[in-house]
Amino acid sequence: MNLTALETFLAIVDTGSLVRASEQLHVSQSTVTTRLQTLEQNLGTTLVHRQKSGIELTEAGRRFRHHAVVMVELWSQAAQDIALPDTVDVVCSIGCHPDLWSGPGRRLFDTIRADHPQAGLTVLPGDQAELERLLRGGLADIAITYEASVQHNQTVRSLDPERLTLVSDRVGTPMRFDPKYIYVEGGEDFRRRHAAAYSDAGTARLSFGSTDWALEEVLRNGGSAYLPTRLTARHIADGRLHPVADAPDFTRSVYLVLSERAATWPWLEPIVETLTPT
């Protein structure tokens, strides 16, 4: 099994067609077919059913796709690692939920750069499922996430929770029944507590799965939304946003997860301690 065969298989999956895969890889269709057949022979199973409308993964193909992605990414990371200068003594990969980058993600990155300049750093974005995959596959050494299920040989640290407050672009916005209210996804616990606090409210016309995008929408087009105070503080200070009176606050848990490898780095523990609450 070689890297080219894996990349060809993933191109077939991504494009949904052997023809389009050949165009993407700039090789002939017969070359793509040969590579796929060789891969299937090596694995002893059929990965793809060929149809006139395109391809359909077999159950084995669906299961193998995850492993193919991990192997290609590991190869890419290995190539990057050995290409680093001699002054780099360790490569640290940080997985971070996109909404947490501007807070604890950026603080961790900046602190490592300042306190351990010999480290080569890679930052990878992802939602909860993607971050778990990166940790499990050895592609991330550290993850900053809103949820943390304790896995074998991983260390989980609680960080300061996010405080979510209701803010608006208008002074005097009502706590309830604002027609410009925007619902921002904040996880299962937030959904439950939000529903209890606003049981008499209807469904918001707009909803966002990203706090950064929701903030941009409020600032550009107006509205009210529950957003992290770390994002809204400066806009409240300059008068662009206003806290909504009498609205309840919520919190959202934040975690830092260390892989077994990262937990052995003596230089990392003091950095982690600066991020974790006392």
Image (tube, helix red, strand yellow):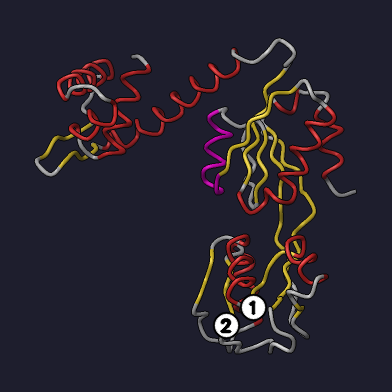
Residue drawn where x is 56% and y is 40% of the image: 132
Q: Which residue is mark 2?
A: 180
Q: Is 132 inside the magenta-drawn segment?
A: yes
Dot 1 amino acid type? Ser
User: Which x, y percent locates residue 63?
Assistant: 35, 34
Q: Is residue 86 magenta?
A: no
Judge the density around disc 1: few (<14), some (14-19), many (≥20) Cα neighbours within 10 Å. Answer: many
Q: Looking at the image, is 199 positioned above or below residue 52?
A: below
Which quarter of the rendered picture does the N terminus lie within? top left
| Front-most of residues 57 and 222 | 222
The residue at the point 53 percent across, 29 percent down is: 137
Tell whether label 2 touches label 1 (CB within 8 Å): yes
174 sits left or right of 67 in the view: right
Q: Residue at x 55, y 48 (%)?
A: 127
Q: Nearer the viewer, residue 64 or 229?
A: 229
Q: Is residue 120 above or below residue 245?
A: above
Residue density around tag 2, few if under 14, some if 14–19, many if 20 or more, within 10 Å: some
Q: Amino acid at mark 2?
A: Lys
Q: Which residue is mark 1?
A: 224
Q: What's drawn in magenta, residue-wise?
A: 126-137
